[in-house]
Image: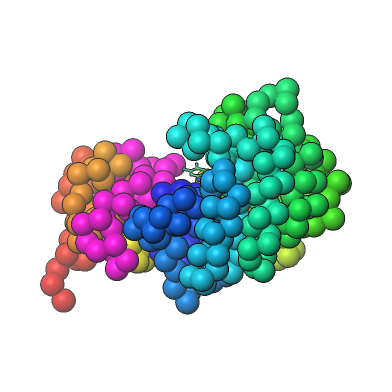
Amino acid sequence: MAGITNIPFRVLLRDFGCALAFTGMISANGLVKESAKSCRYLHSSPMDRPLAVQLFGADPALLAEGAIIAAYHGADAVDINMGCSVKKVVRTGAGAALLKDPQQVARIIKAVRKAVGLPLTVKIRSGWRRGEIKAVEIARIAEDCGADGLIIHPRTADQGFGGKADWGIIEAVKRNLCIPVIGNGDIRHPDDALRMLELTGCDGIMIGRGALGNPWLLGETLSHLSGRDMPHSPSFVEKENVIARHLEMEVDYHGEGRGSRNFRKHLLWYTKGLPGGAKFRGLASSLKGKKLILAELRRFFCFLSDNGYESFVRNIDTCPRYRKSLKPS
Ligand SMILES: Cc1cc2nc3c(=O)[nH]c(=O)nc-3n(C[C@H](O)[C@H](O)[C@H](O)COP(=O)(O)O)c2cc1C
């Protein structure tokens, strides 16, 4: 997910069992022109493996060159984005706009296939707009042109992220392909993952937004799929520890200012649905720096465990455990 799946987030998710992570989409043109921003997105670490680099673009030669650059920088696999519906991207003929041009899809996949020997996947949507479902046609082209796997998010580009993902399209794609098919869309609970696998016969699942603020979903899903008991929901202590670890990694990677600013969105996701979470989120946007965020998290979880955060907001100094945690040791 562009702007979200950076090294710290990927490493965190791997701890919860994520088997394969992808970079957010990277402009092939940017890589070829050596844009610092695009090249930064290729950064990885030994803990961040295996890593698939996702490229976007509309020009077969540029995408092929981008794939060579990604391979040179150690990518374990290359994925081509044919699903992004953002205006800035589709205006250039890239992302989901390619679903309107099957011949260009073929040219792109052939060129990238010829350029690199790495595993090559293609991520598509159902089609450009409702009533023009092209998933099976495009998926077959991908297979015929040498893709090793196909990832399908079964919404049309004009749906954006609205409505429901139509898992029937995953099933149709799977039925028509020999290469592995990865299903994606609306997995928010381990049961969703099991249902997607059972209903569509797909070979693997990809989780996107469900992991935001809930990396536990990955471990819970793996347990559920292997027939083991689902782990208990994380305790407040565990939640606090994971959030703090994620923040530490962001700050280590980006530095104090950018890391803690970047982290605000994760704080909003982590505290969604928790009692008093809305109040915490109101405060979170004004927290500057790791220390302040950690201290506020401490208070939040301390009061959640003891009295509920609402009572903290009413009664700022009354939590004995919080006062104790502030005492110098
Ligand atoms: C903020 C955001 C950024 C995304 N960036 C990308 C991207 O760079 N490449 C991509 O293939 N899909 C991207 N997606 C789409 C997701 O990968 C996924 O296909 C979609 O959210 C549906 O799956 P989900 O219901 O599990 O989230 C993005 C989605 C969101 C919400």
Q: Position of residue 68 (x, y in %)?
A: 55, 65
Q: Position of residue 33 (x, y in %)?
A: 40, 55
Question: 89 above or below 207?
Answer: above
Q: Position of residue 110 (x, y in %)?
A: 70, 54
Question: 137 above or below 38?
Answer: above
Magenta residues (range): 251-280
Q: Position of residue 230 (x, y in %)?
A: 64, 60
Closer-to-camera residue (192/168):
168
Residue furthest to the front: 61
Residue 235 seen anywhere in this rendered image of the structure: no
Residue furthest to the top: 131
Residue furthest to the left: 328
Residue occupying the point 55% across, 40% down: 94
Is residue 254 part of the magenta span, yes or no?
A: yes
Q: Is residue 269 left or right of residue 170?
A: left
Question: 297 above or below 277?
Answer: below
Residue 178 seen anywhere in this rendered image of the structure: yes
Question: In what quadrant does ligand 1 lie?
Answer: top right
Q: Quadrant of residue 225?
A: bottom right
Picture quarter with the C terminus:
bottom left
Closer-to-camera residue (75/201):
75
Residue occupying the point 67% across, 32% down: 100
Closer-to-camera residue (135/110):
110
Instruction: Characterize the magenta stretch by its predominant secondary structure.
Output: helix
Residue occupying the point 44% across, 42% down: 273
